[in-house]
Amino acid sequence: MAAYAVVVRDGQFLLARSPGPGGVPEWVLPGGGMEHGEDPYDTVRREVEEETGYRIEVTGLLGVNSTRRTFPARFGRSVDHHGVRLVYEGRITGGELRSEIGGSTDLAAWQPLDAVPDLVRVRMVDIGLRLWR
């Protein structure tokens, strides 16, 4: 289970960049996996701060995304993975934009909403925007 944030301010969309498959960077929603026993609200606030430097207030649950994928066999057995992702809307309450050091992302940036279709991005970015709109 994971929690992600859609943060939009003045026509700009807060995204993080992650090394993608084959080393090609791709833009992602700030967010990530829940720690055992962690409340999803705490997860999304923690992840946004880790990946972007900003503290946020969660202003609403936009939706839930469920995905199921089978990963190729390692050691003779494939893995059937079911992911549940909570997508929240967030509002900046403090902090300063900075990139994560030593984490799953390497850059945080505001992107113009109208530029998103031209970005190399994961599908979850489009899902988040669709839920927000």
Image (tube, rainbow, N blue to C red):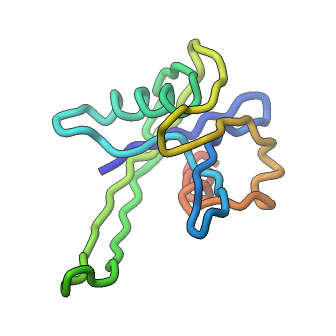
Residue 67 location in percent, x, y? Answer: 37, 68
The residue at the point 80 percent across, 60 percent down is 118
Of 17 and 132, the residue lying toward us: 17
In this rendering, would 102 be left or right of 42?
Answer: right
The residue at the point 58 percent across, 51 percent down is 18
Of 64 and 123, the residue lying toward us: 123
In this rendering, would 4 be left or right of 10?
Answer: left
Residue 42 location in percent, x, y? Answer: 33, 27
Q: Does 60 sit above or below residue 24?
A: above
Q: Residue furthest top?
A: 94
Q: Does 96 sit above or below residue 64?
A: above
Residue 52 location in percent, x, y? Answer: 58, 30
The residue at the point 76 percent across, 41 percent down is 111
Quarter where residue 99 is shown: top right
Of 33 and 73, the residue lying toward us: 73
In this rendering, would 79 be left or right of 97?
Answer: left
Quarter where residue 3 is shown: top left
The residue at the point 32 percent across, 61 percent down is 83
Q: Residue furthest bottom?
A: 76
